Every structure is written in structure tokens, then in C-alpha cells.
Amino acid sequence: MKMIFRWFPNGDDSVTLKDIRHIPGVSGVATALSHIPVGEVWPLEQILSLREEIAAAGLEMEVIESVNIHEDIKKGLPSRDEYISNYITTVKNLHDGGIKCICYNFMPVMDWLRTNLSQSLSDGSTVMSYHHDEVLRMDPSKMADSMLKGANCYSLPGWEPERISAMVKDIEFYKNLSPEQYFDNIRYFLDAVMPFAEEYDINFAIHPDDPPWPIFGLPKLITEVDTIRRFLSLHSSSRNGLAFCTGSLGANAANDLPAMIREFSGQGRIHFAHLRNVKHSGERDFHETAHLSQCGDLDMFEIVKALSDTGFDGYIRPDHGRMIWGETGRPGYGLYDRALGSNYLLGLWEAIRKMS
């Protein structure tokens, strides 16, 4: 197992590589060339330059999060073949740049949604939160503005300008696309890409839907144990795996996360784990919390134990943290609380390994 940290390059992060290097036990970063428009090829020279920058700070670059999927691929449009070809070229370039794992998602229109990016907790920290009734009252044409206003002038992954401009039109398109058609479209993508994942020795880790239930009639793909089984059955390659996000899947209190980990990690299909905690205030209402089990509704000990017991040897990163100690930055991606979270998780991992 390697503990890593998400980092946004090109001055788009309040956290520096030097800061990350100071966190005990963190060996590298998950990063991306997010300035390249979705669907275009990532040039090898830019990948190598980014790797050199990270290596100069004493860190590894083995995970990319994310190489986003062009919406035409998700829609199943005739133009998808061109974008899939570009994607495969990017995969080759990432292999040549030393990448071992690609985290991605197949969520339509938006990667994730919150109703408040800075909800205050009783301890004075702020977190991201979600209230389903507020979502139902949202106007999709104004939703992006609301999200970006709370981003503290940083980019929000999954809310790129080219996606926002077509958001309302795309939502209408998906109302006429059945779940079966959507699964067919991801199968088409996997059938095209997985042979190259095998050839280039790169694991693909799909991120769950966040939150894991329908919004605005959009199709959902990775939400609970049955949909994950169905997704994994679309292509038998072990390269076709998961980025198991406890915060996304844990938003649905009915999901038994340790049991899911034991099943899918036991099959060697979890390549990346995003670990964070959530606290529920209703069936579809929750806010994010500090990583400790006592701070939320998820048993982080049992989650980490399930990974350890099944021989997980992929990557873990502390996911969204609180904003604490007067820090400002991209919501969920400050330094201090995620640093605390990484060391809490490393402590659990060491104790569980020594007890076994």
C-alpha cells in the first residue's frame, strides 16, 4: 500500500509539493493535467515535465486523477471513436511517463454535487455538505454559478468550463437515454481501452457516483454492490477496477462498505481507495467530517481492516477534509485536515498489520 495525496499543478492549489513532502508516510501525489480540454491528447512532454517537478520535491507520480471522459463517449455519439482514440494515445503517453494507475469516472454532466461548500460545524471548522431537498429546488442553469462562487477562486474538478456551458442541454439529452444504453456506452469504452490497459500495464480505477443516487434524471453507474458487480462484469480484465471512495458510497447508509471492500478487493479489483468519513442528517442528507470513526457514521477501522485483510496493495489517499486553523483553499482540499487524516489512516494500517 502507498499513501498519497491529491495535488493540483500549475498554481491551482493552495497546498505545495513541499508541504506534502513534510507529511510523514506520504510517498507521492495523484495529479492531472487539468488545463488540457477534455477529449484532447495529453502530450508526453507535459507529462514528463510534471513528473520531473514532482520528483524534484522528493515525491512519486504514479497515479493520475483524472483523465476525464468526453461527454460524446458517455452519450454514445458517432464522434466517440475519435475521442476514444485520443484517450488511448493519452494512456500510452502516461505509460511512457511512468503512470501505473488512472482514476476516472463515467458520471454524466457533473462529477459530484454539494449544496454547501463551507458548512460550519460545532468546532468552528467548515466542510462540504449535501441536502437533497435543496437539490430538488435547484435550477440547473444556475447551479454551476453557485458551485464556483464557493470555490475560493480555485478550479473545481468535474466543473470544467467546457462542461458547464453545455450542462442544461446535456441534462435534457440524458433524459432520453435509458440505463441499459448507458451501460452499453461504458462497455463500448471498456472494450476499446482495456486491451491497451493490459499492453501498457496500467490499472483503471473508476470512481463511484457522488452522491450515489439519481439527480435531475441523470443515469447512475456505480452506486452500490449490485451496480458495481454489473460494472465489473462488463470486462473481465483485472485492470478494470475501482477507485473505492468511502465518502461517495458511504453517503448511502445502506451500503456495507467493509463487506463491499472484502468482496471487490478480494477479487483484486480495487486499485485506489479514497478514504473519508461522512455524517448523515437524513436519508439523503450528509456532511463531510474529520476522518476519525468517532467523527462520522463510517467505521474507518473496519474499512482499513477490510483492505488490509484482502491484501490490498494499491494506493490510498485521504479524501476531502475540513478547513481548519484559519486555512483557505479549494473546498475539501486544504492541507491540515487531510494531513491529519493521512496519519490517522497510516496509524490504523500499521496497527492492523501488526495485530494480524
Image (cartoon, rainbow, N blue to C red):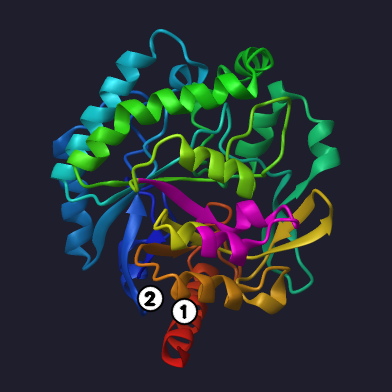
Mark nearest the camera among 1 and 2 is 1
Compared to residue 128, the image places residue 56 above or below, namely below
In the visual, does 338 lie left or right of 194? Answer: right
Quadrant of image for the C terminus? bottom left
Q: Specify whether residue 249 is painted magenta.
A: yes
Point out residue 322 in the picture as x, y percentages from the top left corner: 62, 64
Q: What's drawn in magenta, residue-wise?
A: 240-263
| Res 296 label | none
Q: Which amino acid does label 2 sit on?
A: Ile
Q: Specify whether residue 83 is painted magenta.
A: no
Q: Which residue is drawn at 51% across and 36% down?
A: 158
Neighbours of disc 2 within 10 Å: few (<14), some (14-19), many (20+) = some
Neighbours of disc 1 within 10 Å: few (<14), some (14-19), many (20+) = some
Label 2 near label 1: C-beta < 8 Å?
Answer: yes
Which residue does the numbered mark 1 point to in the structure image?
343
Cα–Cα gap, marks 1 and 2: 8 Å
Q: What element carries label 1?
A: helix
Point out residue 283 in the picture as x, y percentages from the top left corner: 84, 52
Q: Which of 220 and 147 is in front in this view?
A: 220
The mark nearer the N terminus, 1 or 2, is 2
Q: Residue at x 68, y 68 (%)?
A: 298
Which residue does the numbered mark 2 point to in the structure image?
23
Compared to residue 212, the image places residue 195 above or below, namely above
Q: Residue at x 67, y 12 (%)?
A: 176
Quadrant of image for the N terminus? bottom left
Point out residue 52 in the picture as x, y percentages from the top left corner: 16, 54
Point out residue 346 in the picture as x, y percentages from the top left corner: 44, 79
Q: Which of 21 and 263 is in front in this view?
A: 263
